[in-house]
Amino acid sequence: MPYSRNRDYFGFIARMVPGTTTFLFTLLSLLPFHVPSFGSIAPSFALMAVFHWTVYRPDLLPLGVVFFAGLLLDLLNGTPYVGLSALALLLVRTGVLSQRRLFSHRPFSVLWLGFFGAAAGAFALEWAFVSLMQVQLMVPRPFIFQTLVTAACFPIGSYILALAHRAMPALSA
Amino acid sequence: MRVSAPVRATVQRLTLPFLIFISALLAVLGKADVLLFDRVRVVLADAFAPALQVAGEPIVSVSKAIGAVEDVVTVYRQNQELKLENQRLLQWQQVARRVESENEELRNLAKFAPQGAVSSVAAQVIADSGGAFLRNVLVNVGGNEGVTRGQPALTGDGLVGRVIELGDRTARILLLTDINSRIPVVVEGTHERAMLDGDNSDQPRLVYFQPKTPVKPGDRIVTSGSGGIFPPDLPVGVVASVNGVIRVEPYADLARLEMVRIVNYGLDGVLPDNAIPAPHARRGPHARAAAPR
């Protein structure tokens, strides 16, 4: 395990950073942004956090955290399908974990493209699931729009997460 | 992956399928057994309300700043528009004054008792569902402020939706654009009734609608009061398009809700909190006192 060495080096607080930021980003997904023509479609910050930490420190983002972050998101946003976000986040984590090598030591654009793929997959899953449960094809536009908005906001989220990531050694003292 | 103990390895291997299975199961069952989640959800919403409200403050400031910049940029055009609108409104004011006095006289004639709002409470939007398949908002008032399920939420412009979930400090409002929203409406000035059927798009559609006179874009849609959830004549929106599907543009700007008013009209047509009535609901001295003589 390449990161087990770091486990001793990293302090308790530093190891909490991925989980904590994931939960904070989950709450960020819920805040009302009253930006003109932004609509009611908010970028999924939770997805960014799960993607980021799965690429860089999957050892510090256990499955349980991903699951509960998704569950919290579902319970707070009032969806009738509690567990759907949890499912989407878990599948994104699994998918990204299997393709991690693609992203290491690559330029940011590759990471961004990867995130776009992950977001498209996650929202396609939600679209398919909701369509199935409502027994009618949902208008795909909001889902496509949400994918684009989420992907477009990824650099911002990624930058904040990278800052937190860089702060981790300092927190371990 | 390093294997420290066979059991541990097995547990680790099974965690992912197990969690995926649980999430999928919950998502499928959630629809069937909503009551289970309702309690958890309400408790969580109440617990997170202060955090969401504090976290939302900077965002409110930022959007206000953006709004201010926008205002500066468009101030000239806005001024022109406002002047025109003011002219128009002054004319309407005269009409309203005349109608008001006429109304007063007629009421006196008919001994008419107005059925107005009983009370209302202002609420701040603290969370937006933000999802592509959800149209609801969480507001910072709840049972403590006297809000009950089913009460309509309004802005100054028109109807927003109704309270579907209630905590002590929070309430969730199902917007009229949500796929699960159905509102009995009528084309204003006619008796053409219809259902306003949300489909998660910005413009809900009219269904169960067989008008004798065809509707046209610009026709006003108001609540009909059928079903006893909403009082009649709350402004809902205007007909936006009529080709094939009739779509309605809501008056309220649902994409940028900041404050709403939750109004108690004293109606109780909505279903009770759960389908099975509580066994002690009708007992006690109050029930007896209220019993018909």
Image (cartoon, coloured by chain):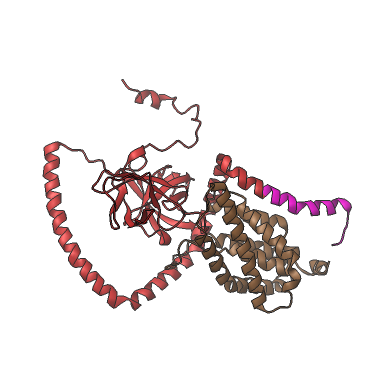
Residue B138 is inside the magenta segment: no
Q: Considering only vertical position in the picture, is B171 above or below B273?
A: below
- Residue bounds of the magenta highlight: B1-22
Residue at x 46%, y 45% (from the top left corner): B164
Horizontally, residue A114 falls left or right of residue B73, namely right
Task: Say which chain is brown.
Answer: A
Q: Residue furthest top?
A: B293
Residue B15 is inside the magenta segment: yes
Q: Nearer the viewer, residue B137 or B186?
A: B186
Q: Position of residue B119 (x, y in %)?
A: 32, 45
Q: Nearer the viewer, residue B142 or B201?
A: B201
Q: Position of residue B287 (x, y in %)?
A: 39, 26
Can residue B10 be spotted in the picture?
yes
Residue at x 14%, y 54% (from the top left corner): B97
Can residue B266 be spotted in the picture?
no
Horizontally, residue B248 falls left or right of residue A11, namely left
Q: Position of residue B253 (x, y in %)?
A: 38, 60
Q: Quadrant of residue B291?
A: top left
Quarter occupied by the N terminus of chain B: bottom right
Task: Say which chain is red.
Answer: B
Q: Main secondary structure of the magenta part?
A: helix
Residue at x 42%, y 56% (from the top left corner): B124
